[in-house]
Amino acid sequence: MKALYIFTVLFISFSFSTVAQTQKLKKIRVEYSGFVDSDSLKGPGVSVFTRDNTQQVHFSHDGINVWCDQAVYYEKEDFIEAYSNVVMKQGDTINMNAKYAEYSGKTQLAFASGDVILTEPKSVLTTDTLYFDRIKQQAFYQSKGKVVRDTSGTITSQIGRYYMNSKKYQFVKNVVLVNPEYTMNSEHLDFYTETGHAYLFGPFTIVGENNTIYAERGFYNTNNDTGYFVKNSKINYENRVFEGDSMYFDRKLSFASATNNIKVTDTINNSIAKGHYAEVWRAKDSVFITKRALAITVQEKDSIYMHSDTLMVTGKPEHRITRAYYNAKIFKSDLSGKADSIHADHKSGLTQLINIDRFPKMDFTIKRRPILWHLGTQITGDSIHLISNPKTEQIDSLLVFDNAFLISKDTLSEGFNQIKGLRLIGLFKDNELYNVDIIKNAEVINYSRDENQELIGINKSKSGKINLLIEDGYKIITLIDQVDSDLWPESKYPKNEKKLRGFDWREEERPKSVEDLFSEDAPLVLPIIKGLGDYVPQEDFFDAALLKRVDDARNKDAKKDEEQKASRTIPKNALKKADPGLENTLQKPQKKEN
């Protein structure tokens, strides 16, 4: 039994050794030779194969087949040179055509030149010279190449590599992807042929008919024309520039969205919208922004800022409309306001401050109506319209509908000047309110002072209409229709009548700077953008493992000046980079001229 066990172990060991030795010694096989000649000038064991009238010369080696019109086979080095109409095929998926090719059975490294075409099921690569390492299953070029994929377009680059196992191309330097819909330019592009997915690293652009995309890291699906971009991302439309930390793009829908540090610049209307989430629908001329949304109308002397929970900018460039929803506010140096929503028509110059009934009804004394602050005056009403001249960028007039109420603090006392009525019409000159008409059910409380600012008395009046004219700092009040007026000394004026019904002084809500527009917002928490992985530099094609195979295949008995077939096409810089001594070991020394 013990003897049988020893015999079995020895037999198995011998079998594995035999298989390993067989695999190790496996050489290039001649499948069809055509005409065969020996070439003694090239040395012993060198044969020349030439096709006949029936078919090409055919070689095979460990899963690869080579056809050509003529070949030179170096038996000792197990190396072939294939000439004219060369076809190299690996399995059912990889085909290579060229004018000339070399193949080493020892290193399993192929080299092809002259109109090289590499075909795999999803793409076709053309280049002038190509290396094919069968051990690593990689093809490599550095003399400019072009890859064509039906649904993705054409990709060209100075340097490229195809990883056959992962079906991935890695393009480097002067990378250009040309598609009927767009052109992509980059320095580093990883492309997967089966999925059509492209990963871009470093600054790149994607130029389409209606937009130009710029980013410094990104992903693009060439099958459905969607993309994801991070790091200095920007989309330049015909009349808008869209920027953000993280951007999604859908070409077919003409849609883009962005997260964190959003900026949308209207290059025609000189306006900017900011926030931390935004959507742009180019075909609909629509922009949606939320999370600290801020719209800025840039003017020569005084820009206007508008903030709300949500901003929408719609309409063609010649007729933009901005809608601000929920807790909307506006600010400029001499005017600020607040409402549930604000609607601004940039063509007509009409800005509407509106409250939406989305909360339970409240008592009229505490209901928060739309409000404007202009210099020292507070203006409220159920809705407020500001009309500006778009050309001069000047405020022209003011309309307040229902429950109009003006309040200004008396300059020298704790009292308040007040005017109220059903409606209000105000006129501006040089952006300052100079004329006010209160229409229907007009009431006024006014602290009347003389030219020395001495208090004359407190005037309380009612009338059908009231006109307020402001000239050189003086207020001239004219009561019209059904006048009921009294002038009281301050000491005799009833304290409980110093405020008209509906009085609501809201100075604490007044935005006095751009930062104040965000004073009522909840703390901002921005999402963390995972982004895309860092670029992994292309590893050396001629790495240490490949060069060791080449060194092992070297003809150790060759004369000093005899050419080493397996290494002669390897670039000198690759040999120097791996080991400075390999250049002299693996390549034929240059002959000295006499």
Image (spheres, rainbow, N blue to C red):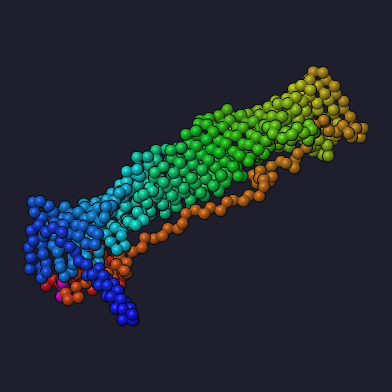
- Left or right: where 164 falls relative to 327: left
- Left or right: where 394 falls relative to 54: right
- Left or right: where 245 falls relative to 333: left
Residue at the extreme front: 1
Residue at the extreme top: 481
Instruction: Please tell me whether residue 562 belongs to the stretch shown in magenta.
Output: yes
Instruction: Please tell me whether residue 520 belongs to the stretch shown in magenta.
Output: no
Residue in view at x 62 percent, y 32 percent: 343
Q: Nearer the viewer, residue 377 or 132?
A: 132
Residue in view at x 34 percent, y 81 percent: 2
State whether residue 15 appears in this view. Answer: yes
Residue 319 in percent (x, y) is at 53, 30
Residue in view at x 84 percent, y 35 percent: 454
Q: Quadrant of the C terminus?
A: bottom left
State whether residue 13 appears in this view. Answer: no
Residue 540 in percent (x, y) is at 33, 64
Q: Quadrant of the N terminus?
A: bottom left
Which secondary structure dominates the residues rendered in magenta?
A: loop
When asked about the image quadrant of residue 223, the answer is top left
Residue 15 in percent (x, y) is at 27, 72
When asked about the image quadrant of residue 208, the answer is top left
The segment highlighted magenta reads 559-563
Compared to residue 129, the image places residue 462 above or below, namely above
Q: Nearer the viewer, residue 317 or 117?
A: 117
Residue at the extreme right: 492
- Left or right: where 443 falls relative to 3: right
Q: How many marks?
A: 0
Compared to residue 539, the image places residue 256 above or below, namely above
Residue 350 in percent (x, y) is at 61, 29
Residue in view at x 11 percent, y 59 percent: 33
